[in-house]
């Protein structure tokens, strides 16, 4: 018998078998978020930002119910999403550092709204790059990565 030690198992999507919730990103410069899972539903939002992270909270056939960085919820067709990892800076002037420590030298100060391509994430820090800068940023300064997310390369 396997004990979960008090932790609950993460739900898996019925279509992909991937964890729910999880983060993915917009694959194209223009992506429509609809009010329901189908082209017959009205468009709720028109996103104009390739790489913007969204949180997948539900799956239905070829559609994914998502929460955007601002809390809005809608449906996006799976072909419009990518599993590439990006993070949206939500903490103004968040330091991008040379190492995964508060003592490391600051490379740049990222403003709210900057999107970083994430190369890896550990328990507290993610290594990302944008606009010619590469460095480490605290996880809590980002939307697009959950506290327990850890990965190498993406």
Image (spheres, rainbow, N blue to C red):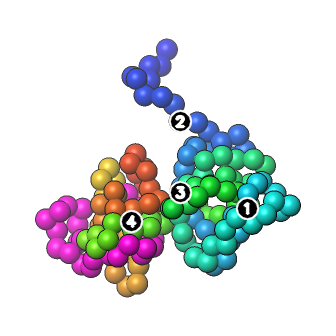
Q: Nearer the viewer, mark 2 or mark 4?
A: 4
* Above-or-below relation of 33 to 9: below
- Of the image marks 3 and 1, the number of the one nearer the N terminus: 1
Q: Is residue 71 left or right of residue 43?
A: left
Gap in Å between the C-alphas at discs 3 and 1? Answer: 15 Å
Q: Nearer the viewer, mark 2 or mark 1?
A: 1
Gap in Å between the C-alphas at discs 3 and 2? Answer: 21 Å
Residue in the foreground of this view, choosing between 133 and 139: 139
Q: Quick one: which residue is furthest to the left in this view?
A: 103
- Of the image marks 2 and 1, the number of the one nearer the N terminus: 2
On residue 10, which mark appears? 2
- Asked which secondary structure carries label 2, the reply is loop
Q: Classify 10 Å Cα crowding around label 2: few (below 14), some (14-19), many (20 and above).
A: few
- Asked which secondary structure carries label 4, the reply is loop
Q: Which residue is mark 1?
A: 34
- Of the image marks 3 and 2, the number of the one nearer the N terminus: 2
- Asked which secondary structure carries label 1, the reply is strand
Picture coordinates of residue 95, whole percent (x, y) = 25, 71
- Residue under the point 39% across and 62% down: 142
Q: Which residue is mark 4?
A: 90
- Residue under the point 58% across and 43% down: 20
Q: Is residue 17 left or right of residue 121?
A: right
- Asked which secondary structure carries label 3, the reply is loop
Q: Which residue is mark 3?
A: 71
- Of the image marks 3 and 4, the number of the one nearer the N terminus: 3
- Residue under the point 48% across and 66% down: 86
Dot 2 and dot 4 residues touching (CB under 8 Å):
no
Q: Which residues are magenta?
A: 97-121
């Amino acid at each position: 018998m396997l004990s979960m030690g008090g932790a609950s198992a993460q739900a898996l999507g019925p279509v992909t078998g991937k964890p729910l919730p999880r983060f993915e990103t917009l694959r194209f410069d223009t992506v429509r978020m609809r009010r329901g899972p189908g082209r017959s539903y009205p468009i709720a939002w028109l996103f104009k930002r390739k790489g913007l992270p969204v949180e997948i909270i539900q799956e239905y056939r070829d559609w994914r119910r998502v929460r955007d960085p601002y809390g809005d919820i809608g449906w996006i067709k799976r072909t419009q999403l990518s599993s590439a990892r990006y993070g949206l800076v939500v903490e103004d002037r968040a330091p991008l550092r040379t190492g995964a420590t508060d003592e490391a030298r600051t490379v740049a100060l990222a403003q709210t709204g900057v999107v970083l391509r994430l190369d890896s994430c550990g328990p507290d820090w993610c290594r990302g790059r944008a606009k010619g800068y590469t460095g480490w940023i605290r996880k809590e300064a980002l939307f697009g990565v959950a506290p327990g997310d850890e990965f190498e390369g993406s």
